[in-house]
Amino acid sequence: MSETVLVIGGGAREHALVWKLSQSPRKPKIICAPGNPGIAPIAECANIGAEDLPSLLAFAKSMRPDLTIVGPDNPLAKGIVDMFQHVGLKIFGPNQKAAQFEASKCFAKDFCLRHDIPTARCATFTNADEALGFSASLPYPQVIKADGLALGKGVIIAQNAAEVRTAVDDMMIKRIFGGAGEKILIEEFMEGLEVSAHAFLDGKNYRMMPLAQDHKRIGENNTGPNTGGMGTYSPVPFADASAEKLIAERIFDRFMAGCVAEEIDFKGVLFPGIMLTDRGPYVIEFNARFGDPETQSLMRRLDSDLLEIILACTQGSLSSQSIQWKDECAATIVLASEGYPGVYKKGLPITGIAEAEKNAAVKVFHAGTKLKEGVLVNSGGRVLSVSATGPSLPQALQTAYAAAEKISFEGKCLRRDIGFQSLSR
C-alpha cells in the first residue's frame, strides 16, 4: 500500500514539490492544503489555510498521513512541526527552535558569529534613535532588515542617511511589516554576486543541491522594490566547483557542527542566501525551507526520488542517499499581477497555459490562481511560474520566455532579464 503524503501550502513552490512527488515510484497518495488549481489534477486539495495550524492538526490527526511536508515559512515559525510530532505524526521541516534561523535574523546572525560563519558586520536594535546612531558609523549603501518574517520584502538597501531614516521609520514606527519590525538589523552592504544555496538536512548530515540564482527586485537590472522573487535559474555559470566547495566548508559544515554543538535538531531544508565576494562566500540570511521560485527550477533538475530523500531526512539516514541531478539547465520566469508587490487587481481571466505546456520542456506552476465559475483567474501578486529546461542557460531561458508569451491576463508583468548576470559574463 502506497504512502499518503500531506503537503502544506498553496503556491508555485508547493505545486513544484507535488509535481515531483507525484513521479515517485512509490506512487504516494498526495493531499495538498490548501493547494491550488494547478495542483488539483495531480493531488487532492483540502481547503485549509497553510497558517491555520489547529485545523491542519485536526485534519492530519483524522487522516493520519505517513508524511507531512511543509512548504511556507510561517507555519514552521509557529511550531507546526512540534505540534505534529507531539501527536506522533511524521513531518518534514525544522522544529520551532530550528526555524528561528529564518524567523529571527538576529538569532541567525548571533549563531553565525558564534560558529565563525562568514556574514556581514551588523548590529541589532529595538530603539530607532540607537539604530540611526549606529548607521552613522557605517559607509553607504547599508542594508536595513526587519528581524522577523516579512514575506521576503523586509529588506531595504539604503543609499544615504535619508533613506536609512525612512526605512527605520517605516519598520519601527509605522510598522509596515507589523511585528517583524519590532527589532531591526543594520548591516554593511556586501559587494558581489548573490546565489541561493539549498541543502537537505537530517539533523547530523547534509546534502547540497545545485546552486540557483533568484531575482528579487521587481524591475530589470535589479531595480525597484523587493518581491518574493521574479525568476530563477540553475545551475549558476559564474559559481564554479571551487565556489561550491567553499560554500560547503565555510557555511554548511560550520552550520551543521554548530547545530550539533547547540543541540538544535534541524531536519528539513536549509536555504542560505549567499553573496560571493572577493573574500569568499558570505551569508546574507538563512531560510529554513525550500525557496520560491528556486524550487521550481531545482525540481526540474532533480533526477532522484524526492519522497525517498525527504523520508531519509526524517529518519536521520540522509548519508545513505545517492542524489542525482540532471545536467540540463532550468529557468523559471514569474508572471506577476500589475502593481505587485503593491496593490493589484484580482479576478482577471488567465489563458494560454495549455498552449505553453505543449512544449515538453515547459511546465507552468500555479501560485496566485483560483477558479471563479469555472474560469481560471489571478488571485495573488505572483500568479504563475513558467519553468523550462534546456541543454544550456540561454536555451532554457529562450524556451521559458517563449512559453510565457503564450500566457495572457490583463496587466501581466514579468522581468525580461532573468539570468542577465550570467549571460553578461
Image: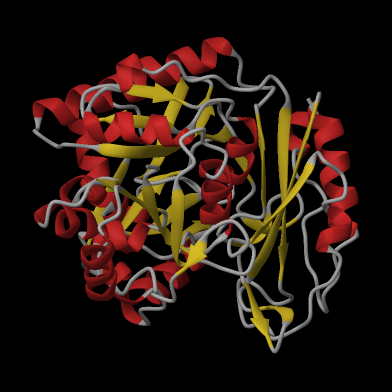
Q: Position of residue 183 (x, y in %)?
A: 25, 64
Q: Which quadrant does the N terminus fall into? A: top left
* Relative vertical location of residue 121 with respect to residue 56 in this rendering, above or below: above
* Depth check, front residue: 184 or 264: 264
Q: Please indicate, yes or no, whether residue 138 appears anywhere in the rendered image.
A: no
Q: Quadrant of the C terminus?
A: top right
Residue drawn at point x = 25 percent, y = 54 percent:
124
> Is residue 84 rendered to the left or right of residue 371?
left
Please tell me which residue is depicted at 23% across the width and 50% down the height of the picture.
100
Kindly give the residue lying farthest to the bottom in the view shown: 373
Furthest toward the front, the residue is 1
The residue shown at (70%, 86%) is 347
Percent position of residue 254, x then y: 26, 22
Rendering coords of residue 191 (x, y %): 55, 34
Looking at the picture, tell me which residue is in the foreground, 3 or 225. Answer: 3
The quarter holding residue 317 reads top left
Residue at image coords 39%, 75%: 48
Count numbered badges in the picture.
0
Can residue 339 be seen by looking at this rendering? yes
- The coloring applied to the image is secondary structure
Q: Position of residue 206 (x, y in %)?
A: 33, 23
